[in-house]
């Protein structure tokens, strides 16, 4: 904003709608709707063209901060304007903001409004709805939206661009997986296979994690082998899911296999992955391996965090190793004190 103010002071400056819109969007993301409104007014005062893109940017700023009265008021203004008519993108932004605060009543109003305005939802709209309904456990509504999406997939010209994409199915798999609806997950997977939707790394990670958390290790391992055969490279998320599953199953040998697989890949490992390893070995009271993970972290340039240490202390306490737990707590306090003194100096 300071750079923008400096620009406006220059002799060569000419008002540019595109710059204003980018700044209004930025302020919206920063939850500063009042400043976004002021900038929009400045845009008007400087004679910039006010189109639906500019109005949508301001409406987005309002809705991101849950100022729905202002957002809906602006939407009504846009509907009655000749130059700022709302489009599917406008509605999708407002629907997403309403869904984030579970304002489903407002969403139903917006969807009805879209119908009356002759604006069909697109893939983004449908995916946003499916994701929100799934996370809220509203599976009947989620499946209703999916059914509508599938029904409209071949409609022309209004139905163009609303066929399901891979993200739609990833959302469904994730939603069903989190509540253990494995038959429905399988149905989605079969549908994807039937209509030749290629699985992505996200798809594999979702299903591997779901079956791993359910303790269905054979299905998890089958999917991991399938992933490798399809030449989809596993990443840190994949390996975390495998380690968590084997940790819960008490299978240290399988975790060792995962670590050997990792050695032959270029996967970037992070602290979250090492914390999964620490937790897995801690569950099995494999304290020697747990300490080795700390050494491995140093070699990989990953610093242990609070989660790492809390996980180790918890494992010690569960095993009745209270002296080791106390020793580690004292070490952490000493390290934190040293850091504070260093910062003060």
Image (cartoon, rainbow, N blue to C red):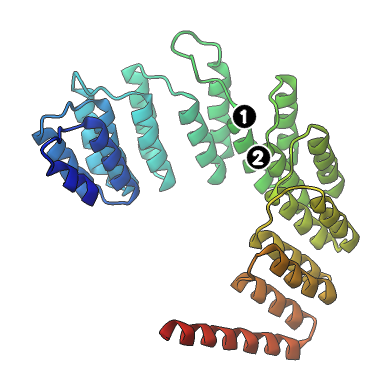
Q: Which residue is mark 1?
A: 166
323 shown above or below 2: below
135 shown above or below 294: above
Q: Is residue 106 left or right of residue 297?
A: left
Q: Is residue 259 visible?
A: yes
**Along the line of sight, the residue nearer the viewer: 59 or 76:** 59
Residue 224 — which label? none
Q: Is residue 146 left or right of residue 60?
A: right
Residue 202 — which label? 2
Residue 119 percent location from the top left of the image: 37, 19
Q: Secondary structure at mark 2?
A: helix
Residue 79 percent location from the top left of the image: 23, 24
- Most extreme residue toward the right, as rendered? 253
The image quarter containing residue 142 is top right
Residue at the image position 87 percent from the left and 59 percent from the top: 256
Residue at the image position 31 percent from the left and 51 percent from the top: 31
Q: Residues within 10 Å of mark 1 (few under 14, many from 20)?
A: some
Q: Is residue 73 left or right of residue 271?
A: left
Asked if disc 2 and disc 1 are in contact, CB closer than 8 Å, the reply is yes
Q: Is residue 256 left or right of residue 14?
A: right
Q: Quadrant of the C terminus?
A: bottom left
- Most extreme residue toward the top, as rendered? 156
Q: Earlier in the sequence, mark 2 or mark 1?
A: 1
217 shown above or below 116: below
Residue 259 percent location from the top left of the image: 82, 57
Q: Residues within 10 Å of mark 2 (few under 14, many from 20)?
A: some
**Along the line of sight, the residue nearer the viewer: 35 or 126:** 35
Q: Is residue 285 visible?
A: no
Q: How many numbered marks does the figure carry?
A: 2
């Amino acid at each position: 904003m300071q750079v923008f103010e400096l620009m406006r002071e220059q002799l060569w400056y000419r008002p540019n709608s595109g710059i204003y819109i980018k700044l209004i969007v930025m302020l919206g993301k920063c939850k500063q709707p009042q400043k976004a409104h002021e900038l929009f007014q400045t845009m008007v005062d400087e004679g910039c063209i006010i189109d639906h893109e500019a109005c949508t940017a301001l409406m987005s700023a309002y809705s991101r901060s849950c100022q729905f009265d202002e957002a809906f008021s602006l939407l009504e203004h846009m509907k009655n304007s000749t130059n700022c008519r709302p489009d599917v993108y406008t509605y999708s932004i407002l629907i997403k903001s309403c869904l984030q605060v579970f304002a489903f009543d407002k969403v139903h109003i917006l969807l009805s409004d879209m119908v009356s305005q002759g604006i069909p939802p697109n893939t983004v709209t449908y995916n946003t709805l499916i994701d929100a309904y799934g996370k809220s456990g509203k599976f009947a509504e989620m499946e209703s939206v999916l059914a509508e999406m599938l029904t409209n997939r071949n409609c022309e010209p209004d139905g163009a661009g609303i066929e399901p994409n891979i993200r739609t199915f990833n959302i469904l798999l994730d939603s069903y997986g989190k509540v253990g609806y494995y038959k429905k997950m399988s149905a989605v997977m079969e549908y994807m296979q039937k209509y030749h939707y290629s699985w992505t790394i996200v798809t594999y990670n979702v299903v591997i994690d779901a079956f791993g958390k359910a303790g269905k290790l054979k299905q998890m391992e089958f999917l991991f082998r399938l992933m490798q055969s399809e030449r989809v490279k596993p990443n840190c998320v994949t390996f975390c899911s495998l380690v968590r599953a084997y940790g819960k199953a008490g299978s240290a040998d399988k975790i060792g296999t995962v670590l050997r697989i990792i050695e032959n890949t270029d996967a970037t490992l992070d602290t979250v992955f090492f914390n999964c390893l620490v937790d897995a070995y801690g569950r099995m009271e494999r304290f020697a391996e747990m300490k080795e993970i700390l050494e491995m972290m140093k070699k990989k340039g990953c610093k242990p965090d609070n989660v790492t240490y809390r996980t180790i202390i918890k494992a010690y306490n569960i095993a009745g190793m209270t002296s080791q737990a106390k020793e580690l707590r004292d070490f952490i306090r000493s390290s934190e004190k040293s850091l504070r003194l260093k910062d003060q100096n």
